[in-house]
Image (cartoon, helix red, strand yellow):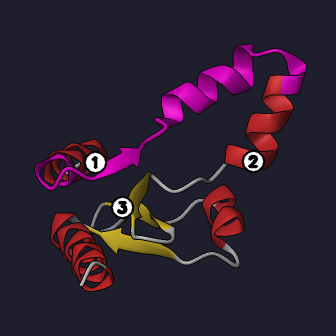
Amino acid sequence: MLEKEIQSKAESYLNEFGLKFIHIPDSVLGHIAQHGASQVRNAVSRSLKGIPDLLIFSKSEKFNHCFMLELKTEKGTLRQGQINWHKGQNVVVTYGWDEARKAIDEFIEFIDKEQE
């Protein structure tokens, strides 16, 4: 399964649970990096290069939670920008749809326990 297919399945799955998420496609980041104003290019390069595929949000009574999920194919590898961005963060990297679904399910279980 291609990464874009895993991405699509993950987004559909998240929508089933009513979870809000952000996905910034690599093509958008690439376009900005090539055609944006220099200040924008610098900001994208500095802040968004390597950002996880999905930022999934949930809120509890006191806090918002952000689950950062990096989606890869079963044989995929992390790029250097991703490795750099992930340092010091709790980014879950999954390989294939089964791992991605399991990670999302674990986040949903965490949300459910927070709301008890």
- Image quadrant in which you'd find residue 45: top right
Mark 1 highlights which residue?
7
Q: Which residues are magenta?
A: 14-39
The mark closer to the camera, 2 or 1, is 2
Out of 105 and 110, give the one closest to the viewer.
110
Q: Position of residue 53 (x, y in %)?
A: 44, 52
| Image mark for residue 72 | 3
Q: Which residue is at 27% across, 53% downward?
A: 19
SS at mark 3? strand
Residue 21 magenta: yes
Residue 72 in the figure: left or right of residue 13: right
Percent x, y of residue 112: 22, 78
Q: Earlier in the sequence, mark 3 or mark 2?
A: 2
Query: Which class describes the residues within 10 Å of circle 1: few (<14), some (14-19), or many (20+)?
Result: many
Displayed quadrant of residue 97: bottom left
Measured along the vertical axis of the image, is residue 32 above or below residue 6? above
Query: Looking at the picture, which amino acid does disc 1 mark?
Result: Gln
The tally of labels here is 3
Q: Which type of secondary structure does the marked residue at label 1 adopt?
A: helix
**Callout 2: 10 Å neighbours few (<14), some, many (20+)?**
few
Q: Going from the N terminus, do you reach mark 2 or mark 1 first?
A: 1
The amino acid pointed to by label 3 is Lys
Q: Which residue is mark 2?
A: 47
Query: The residue under label 2 is which amino acid type?
Result: Ser
Residue at x-position 29% and y-position 75%: 111
Give the number of the disc on residue 69: none
